[in-house]
Amino acid sequence: MKFFVDSADLEKIAYLNDIGLVDGVTTNPSIIAKSGRDFIEVIKEICDMVEGPVSAEVTAMKADDMIAEGRHLRKVASNVCVKLPLTMDGLKACKVLSSEGTPVNVTLCFSANQALLAAKAGATFISPFIGRLDDIGLDGLELIEEIRTIYDNYGFETEILAASIRSVGHIKECALIGADVITSPPDVIAKLSEHVLTQKGLDAFMKDWEKTGQKIL
Ligand code: E4P
């Protein structure tokens, strides 16, 4: 399973990237607003740092304008992946841009039927939002399962990019279901390393080591 970081925080992306935990990055207009940075500039910097796809989202509403924005974003760096909303206009832009060889991430997916349309329109990635479904009392992980089944039934190559991740539990369940990619806030990725028994064991080892009075270096 690939790990994408859902952030425009260069420092946090670099930290995880140095450990080999970053296969790509996703952003959205809210993430860009939170960064306080110029959109194109920050996307370029992330693209320079990370080898994998970096999703940059269009903000136009009409297909023709989305296509123009997508073509513009694609010129920023060779690893830009154009992010489009799951609307009929977004799907039309997806078909055109993906036919030109541009990787496309179709975002704001909340149903299996929407995911089916994105695959038929040639999306490289479909982004179902788990956390936002959980927020309204639905089961985000069930959606990932449904999409996995549908894509496998018909051999669609669109990758399931599980988004709106809120917890380490979400990541484990996505891996068990067989999501191709998760995109997560950097802090949740770092949390995957934590276990109470790891810390307890380490504390005990260090205490005993101190008693030996030895040093390795
Ligand atoms: C995905 O590409 C989105 O940027 C993201 O996962 C949204 O997550 P949120 O629901 O926590 O804002």
Image (tube, helix red, strand yellow):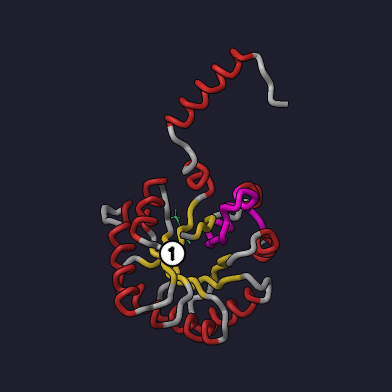
Judged from the image, the secondary structure of the residue bearing numbered disc 1 is: loop
How busy is the neighbourhood of tag 1: few (under 14 within 10 Å), some, or many (20 plus)?
Answer: some
Q: Which residue is mark 1?
A: 180
Left or right of 62 in this view: 80? right
- The image position of residue 9, as x and y in percent, is 61, 51
Question: In the image, is residue 23 above or below residue 194?
Answer: below
On-image quarter of the C terminus? top right
Residue closer to the observer: 110 or 120: 120
Residue closer to the observer: 31 or 174: 174
Residue closer to the observer: 30 or 80: 80
Disc 1: residue Cβ within 8 A of ligand 1's nearest atom: no
Residue drawn at the location 36% of the way across and 57% of the way down: 130
Amino acid type at mark 1 = Asp
Residue drawn at the location 33% of the way across and 68% of the way down: 148
Question: In the image, is residue 147 above or below residue 11?
Answer: below
Q: Is residue 33 magenta?
A: yes
- The image position of residue 54, as x and y in percent, is 59, 65
Residue furthest to the right in view is 217
Q: How many marks?
A: 1
The quarter of the displayed image where residue 111 is located: bottom left
Residue drawn at the location 57% of the way across and 56% of the way down: 22
- The image position of residue 96, as x and y in percent, is 51, 86
Question: In the image, is residue 150 above or below residue 38?
Answer: below
The quarter of the displayed image where residue 110 is located: bottom left
- The image position of residue 170, as x and y in percent, is 38, 51
Q: Is residue 106 magenta?
A: no
Q: Which residues are magenta?
A: 16-37
Residue drawn at the location 63% of the way across and 53% of the way down: 36
